[in-house]
Amino acid sequence: MGTMHMLGLAKRVKARFLLASTSEVYGDPELHPQSEEYWGNVNPIGIRSCYDEGKRVAETPAFDYHRQNDVDIRVARIFNTYGARMLENDGRVVSNFVVQALSATPLTVYGNGSQTRSFCYVSDMVDGLIRLMNSCHTGPINPGNPDEYTILDLAQIIQKIVNPEVAIQFEPLPQDDPRRRRPDIHKARSRLGWQPTVALSQGLQATIADFRSRLETTPCTDTNRIWTVQS
């Protein structure tokens, strides 16, 4: 409904409209890596479907308003983004692992950790979105880092940087958790002249330093409230 209201506003004032969609529209993909032409593999009634299908539905009126009312839209299917100033309890896997490692709490990995994700540093993502908004390309476009890591890889990298003594704890894999996720960024390169420049190790160092400074100021003692989404 928020998307519909904003599209109506963009139509009335003739504004350019950015829809922050998500790689979750691809669901548990059968195509790897995922290109913008891929329609996805989403369970419409699964436990993740509110988010997955919500974003898929949001793209539909965006393109309808574009075709029928000439609304100037841009659609970005954002892949995992991380960086300084993330909320400690936002439920994302990077913030979960960093907070757990800094508090000497076992890092929670779901399944055997073999599921893969790609992680794009926030400054790269902002640059990509600005380029998309300044371009003539409506999208959808995949802003994301094509470097692919398993969740266990990520846990071990953060463990090594923060506290090699902290344990890794394995828990059952949630239903419909995507097995693989990696963006095909050919369109972003060719149409926007964009590709990420911050390596995971570099971005994690900056992210961890930011978390450490904030947690030292206001310690996060309620570690039981760390959410469990790894997407």
Image: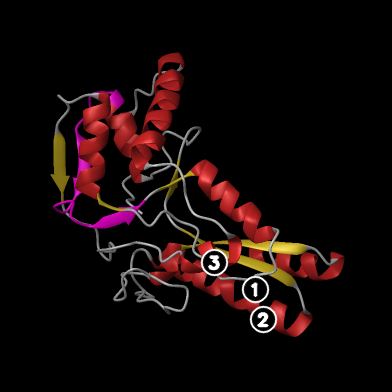
Q: Quadrant of the N terminus?
A: bottom right
Give the residue at x 57% y 59%. Answer: 193
x, y percent for residue 62: 65, 73
Instruction: Give the residue at the far right of this rendering.
Output: 13
Counting from the top left corner in percent of width and height, residue 136 is at: 70, 68
Q: Based on the picture, tell me whether residue 81 belongs to the magenta stretch.
A: no
Q: Is residue 18 left or right of residue 102?
A: right
**Where the C terminus falls, by quadrant?**
bottom left
Residue drawn at point x = 41 percent, y = 24 percent: 209
x, y percentage for residue 120? 43, 48
Identify the magenta region.
102-118
For the residues marked 1 and 2, what is the alpha-carbon distance in whole angstroms?
5 Å
Residue 207 is situated, as x and y percent measured from the top left of the image, at 42, 32
Q: Which residue is mark 2?
A: 64
Q: Is residue 108 magenta?
A: yes
Residue shown at the point (48%, 33%) measured from the top left:
84
Q: Amino acid at mark 2?
A: Asp
Instruction: Name the residue beneath numbered marker 1.
Output: 62
- Amino acid found under the numbered disc labelled 1: Ala
For label 1, the SS is helix
Which numbered disc flags the more N-terminal residue, 3 or 1?
Answer: 1
- Horizontally, residue 230 falls left or right of residue 218, namely left
At label 3, counting other C-alpha atoms closer than 10 Å, the crowd grade (few under 14, some 14-19, many 20 or more) is few
Could you tell me if the residues under marks 1 and 2 are in contact, i.e. CB atoms within 8 Å?
Answer: yes
Q: Amino acid at mark 3?
A: Ser
What is the spatial separation of the Cα atoms under label 3 and label 1, in whole angstroms? Answer: 23 Å
Badge 1 crowding class, 10 Å Cα cut-off, few under 14, some 14 to 19, many 20 or more, is many
Q: Report which residue position mark 3 lands on.
A: 190
Q: What colouring does the structure picture have?
A: secondary structure
Using the rendered image of the protein, determine whether residue 218 is visible from the camera's viewpoint. yes
